[in-house]
Image: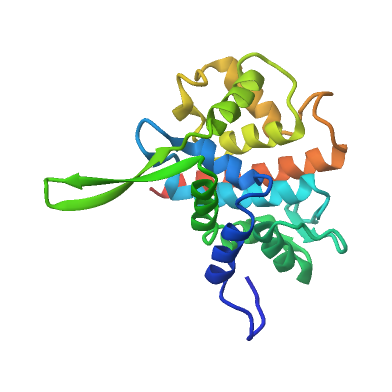
Amino acid sequence: MSRQPDEPPVEARADSASEAHSSGPPTLPEDLLLLLFRPEQGVIAGETTLFYALAGAVLADLALQGSLAAQRTRAASVDVEAVQGKAPSDEILLDAWKYLSDGPRGVQTVLPAIGPALRQPVLDRLLARGDMRKEKRTVLTFFSTTVLREGHSGRRAGLVKDVRDVLVDGKEPTARTAALAALIWGSGTLHQFDPEIPWNSSVIDRARRLEQGNWGAGATGEAVTRTMTAAIVNNVVSATASVSARQ
């Protein structure tokens, strides 16, 4: 991200952001990272392409708040730009919003630009909230290592239930849950939620509809926001598939 010479580096601003807003309302990237955490294994699903998914969540959150505008280019790609006068209060989202205030940028350019610096500050917030915790373990009686464990807030279980209700039971989602489910699908990790969220044809079909912006009447928000979020998720899908194909 671009910054002025007297500004602190992105990492420093990110650390400050994680501390300043860990007690505020959770952001979409926080919810996504918490969902992608696999408690039984102590790992985060999709680590190799995680930054694309987190960046997509930041853009989707900005879109849901009305802080982001999008337009299709002649080449059929999607450009996004900050909506002036609609700066978000959250520091992580604000950093991305400022980056997009310089003018329209292609989503495929934005994702790798803002994504790599997101994991740690977002994780720090989850730890500060008690949604996740760190546990020290001794390996081979000599080496000490730190592993991630689920916290005691119970928030992950609530998020999984919300997504499961939509993908398994066909409940109409809120706009936020629709975006979360679509981003999980876009990250290529949905199959890893089985058996919490069964991996079957009906779940896949519903996830694909959410990816395309078909959220149903229950998901409040203007059609343009759904279309914008769908375009963001589609770019996450493309970026994730491209990385996976090279591995």
Could you tell me which residue is drawn at 75 percent across and 58 percent down? 89
Q: Position of residue 190 (x, y in %)?
A: 52, 30
- Residue 31 image-quadrant placement: top right
Q: Look at the picture and state if 192 lies above or below 33.
A: above
Query: 138 left or right of 60?
Result: left
Q: Is residue 235 visible?
A: no
Q: Is residue 115 visible?
A: yes
Query: 243 left or right of 67?
Result: left
- Residue 159 image-quadrant placement: top right
Which residue is farthest bottom? 5
Q: Please name the colour scheme applied to the rendered image.
A: rainbow
Query: 144 left or right of 118?
Result: left
Could you tell me which residue is drawn at 70 percent across and 56 percent down? 90
Q: Position of residue 103 (x, y in %)?
A: 79, 68
Quarter of the image where the N terminus is located: bottom right
- Pick the residue in front: 147 or 4: 147
How many numbered marks have been drawn onto this rendered protein structure?
0
Q: Look at the picture and state if 223 lies above or below 56.
A: above
Could you tell me which residue is drawn at 53 percent across and 57 percent down? 121
Q: Position of residue 171 (x, y in %)?
A: 71, 17
Q: Position of residue 182 (x, y in %)?
A: 64, 34
- Pick the residue in front: 95 or 89: 89
Which residue is farthest left? 141
Could you tell me which residue is drawn at 21 percent across and 52 percent down? 144
